[in-house]
Amino acid sequence: MLSQHIKEHTHAAHQNVEGTIVRQLKNIRSEADYAEVLKGFYAYFRAVEDNIAPYITAAVLPDLAERRNSAYIKRDIEALGGRVDDLPEATAPAVGNVLEALASLYILEGSIMGGPYIVQMLNKYGVSKGTSFFEGYGENSRDMWAGFTAVLNKYGSDPSTYERAVEIANQTFYNFGEVFTSIASEK
């Protein structure tokens, strides 16, 4: 299955990005700090969403309207008193078809699955507002992930497409990490 293949072949990129983001999260000392980190998520998620929009429709992903997206992140930034007019640069990988778009979306959906751990970390730092995005799908998380991977595996049923899907997924991870690398270098 393509979902398993992507997971196995993006492990290093996943670990690298996770480390970069966790370092950013560990530096949060205030709601303003958290809002700045969220700007990186917002800028990148919005860039990816804009790129995949021509390919990922409700016809492809029937529960698309129910999924977390950059609008949740924007609301969280605003709930923290932040604004989204000064965002870090974010470049999404170019995608040219439904499968490539799904491979990119795989990374975003996967990061949503890890959101509850981020909420726990934020709570330790005294941040309790602006977490609607990271709260993910709550008790529906497993079903939402299963629904997404079923669609990915349906469109990626041909093993000859796996290599390109992995390339897009790895590039999505890499570009995501670049957003946070640039944020860290600005401090």
Image (cartoon, rainbow, N blue to C red):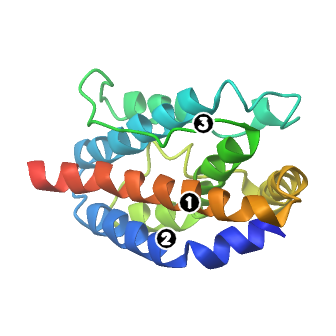
Question: In whole angstroms, how far apart are the C-alphas of marks 3 and 2?
Answer: 20 Å
**Residues at badges 3 and 2 in contact (C-beta under 8 Å)?**
no
Asked if residue 47 is positioned above or below residue 134 in the image, the reply reads: above
Q: Residue furthest front?
A: 160
Q: Amino acid at mark 3?
A: Asn
Foreground mark, 3 or 2, reads 2
Identified at 47% across, 78% down, the residue is 12
Foreground mark, 3 or 1, reads 1
The local secondary structure at tag 2 comes to helix
Q: Amino acid at mark 1?
A: Glu
Question: In whole angstroms, how far apart are the C-alphas of marks 1 and 2?
Answer: 13 Å
Give the quarter of the figure containing the N terminus.
bottom right
Q: Position of residue 67 (x, y in %)?
A: 72, 39
Q: Which residue is mark 1?
A: 167
- Mark 3, other Cα within 10 Å: few <14 / some 14–19 / many ≥20: some
Q: Which of the marked residues, 3 or 2, is nearer the chain's N terminus?
A: 2
- Residue 28 visible in the current orientation: yes
Foreground mark, 1 or 2, reads 1
Identified at 27% across, 42% down, the residue is 36
Q: Residue furthest top?
A: 85
Identified at 41% across, 31% down, the residue is 79
Q: Position of residue 7 (x, y in %)?
A: 66, 72
Residue 8 image-quadrant placement:
bottom right
- Is residue 170 shown left or right of residue 22? right
- Mark 1, other Cα within 10 Å: few <14 / some 14–19 / many ≥20: some
Q: Position of residue 92 (x, y in %)?
A: 45, 40
Q: Amino acid at mark 2?
A: His
- Residue 115 visible in the current orientation: no
The local secondary structure at tag 3 comes to loop
Asked if residue 153 is positioned above or below residue 53 in the image, the reply reads: below
Q: Which residue is mark 2?
A: 14
- Is residue 135 shown left or right of residue 89? right
